[in-house]
Image: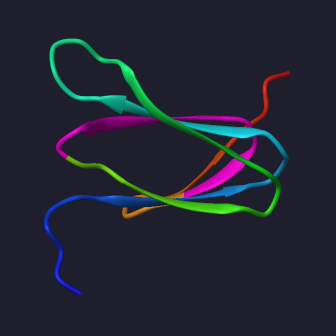
Amino acid sequence: MERNGSDYIVIKAKEDGVNVIGLTRGSDTKFHHSEKLDEGEVLIAQFTEHTSAIKIRGNAIINTSYGEIESEAKK
């Protein structure tokens, strides 16, 4: 598989209702895409020329090229 320099992340929801929000690049950061995952669902996301950040809200496991991170639900 040829890599084009864009990083991928894998998000696995540990509860229903995990929100994944893509944020744009540029001088004005804006929401440009969102997904809602239920428990056990997996989303593979990519940083691109349009996506500079990904916000994850809820309890999920996030795998990146830098390692695994676990987000937590709001208490």
| Horizontal and vertical percent position of residue 52 | 28, 36
Residue at the outermost bottom position: 1
Q: Is residue 61 above or below residue 65?
A: above
Instruction: Name which quarter of the figure residue 36 lies in.
Output: top right
Q: Can you tell which quarter of the image residue 32 is in?
A: top left
Where is the N terminus found, in terms of image quarters? bottom left
Name the main secondary structure of what is drawn in magenta.
Answer: strand
Q: Where 37 falls versus 1 (above or below)?
A: above
Q: Residue at x 29, y 39 (%)?
A: 51
Residue at 80% x, 53% y: name it: 14
Verify whether residue 56 appears in magenta. yes
Residue 10 vs residue 22, the one in the foreground: 22
In the image, is residue 57 part of the stretch drawn in magenta?
Answer: yes
Residue at the extreme top: 28
Classify residue 17 as left or right of residue 50: right
Name the spot of residue 53 as percent of width and height, x first.
36, 35
From the viewer's side, name the closer residue of 24 and 57.
Answer: 24
Rendered-image quadrant of the C terminus: top right
Q: Residue 28, how many percent across, how many down? A: 23, 12
Which colour scheme appears in the figure? Answer: rainbow
| Residue occupying the point 29% across, 59% down | 7
Q: Is residue 45 above or below residue 33?
A: below
Left or right relative to 75: residue 9 = left
* Residue 72: percent from left, percent from top: 74, 37
- Number of marks in the image? 0
**Which residues fall within the magenta stretch?**
49-62
Residue at 79% over, 39% down: 17
